[in-house]
Image (spheres, helix red, strand yellow):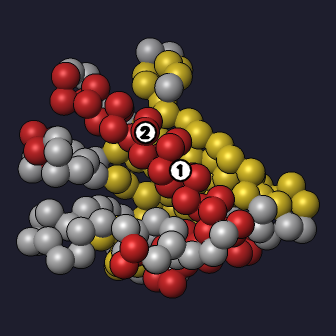
Amino acid sequence: MRKISGETVLAFEKTIPASIEDVWESWTTEQGVKSFFAPDCHIEIKPGGAFEMFFNPEGEPGERGGEGCRILAIEKPTLLSFTWNFPPEIPQLRNNHQYTHVSLRLSPISPGSTLVKIIQDGWGIGEEWEKGISYFSRAWGEIVLPRLYERFTKGPISWNMM
């Protein structure tokens, strides 16, 4: 976590052993998302399009995960910007339709290696927002990026085994 002019910004990066095109496909296609990020999704790869990750696809509407998230900007294959909601564990923010902003930036290091940066901002102030910062510090840094790395080193996740 960093403070930039008093604003909280979460920033994570990891080198992924795959081409920028393959990493881009992992984030922007249903098959790619299901290989590391979530067991189901709804993606419309255009500005204003859906970018919904369903971590609990069998859940009731409103309890499935990244519902209502939207793509803000696309610059294939280097930038994907989207809104991001809060998990059911933080109901005050989730139920009040609060969102943050996430920028995914990809940079080729070599033909078979890509630097992935995740930057999340747009945080409010208060105890519930602090819970969100803590939650996403763990989620991006300890779950999502390591799973993306493993997707290219060990193969896609088998959600049936989790």
| Disc nearest the viewer among 1 and 2 | 2
Q: Taking 37 as reference, is 162 left or right?
A: left
How many numbered marks have been drawn onto this rendered protein structure? 2
- Residue 42 screen position, x and y as percent: 35, 79
- Residue 121 screen position, x and y as percent: 43, 37
Q: For residue 12, which quarter of the picture?
A: top right
User: Which residue position holds label 2?
Assistant: 138
Residue located 43% across and 25% down the image: 8
CA gap between label 1 and label 2 equals 17 Å
Res 103 label: 1
- Residue 37 screen position, x and y as percent: 46, 66
Q: For residue 40, which quarter of the picture?
A: bottom left
Residue located 57% across and 52% down the image: 145
Q: Nearer the viewer, residue 128 or 105?
A: 128
Mark 2 Cα-neighbour bin, 10 Å: few <14, some 14–19, many ≥20: few
80 up-or-down from 22: above or below: above
**Mark 2, secondary structure of its residue:** helix
Residue located 9% across and 71% down the image: 60
- Residue 110 screen position, x and y as percent: 90, 60
Mark 1 Cα-neighbour bin, 10 Å: few <14, some 14–19, many ≥20: many
Q: Taking 15 as reference, is 10 left or right?
A: left
Quarter of the rendering occupied by the C terminus = bottom left
**Mark 1, secondary structure of its residue:** strand
Q: Give the amino acid type for the residue marked by disc 1 in the picture.
A: Ser
Q: Is residue 81 visible?
A: yes
128 up-or-down from 61: above or below: above
Q: For residue 70, which quarter of the picture?
A: bottom left
Q: Give the amino acid type for the residue marked by disc 2 in the picture.
A: Arg
Q: Is residue 48 visible?
A: no
Mark found first going from the N terminus, 1 or 2 = 1
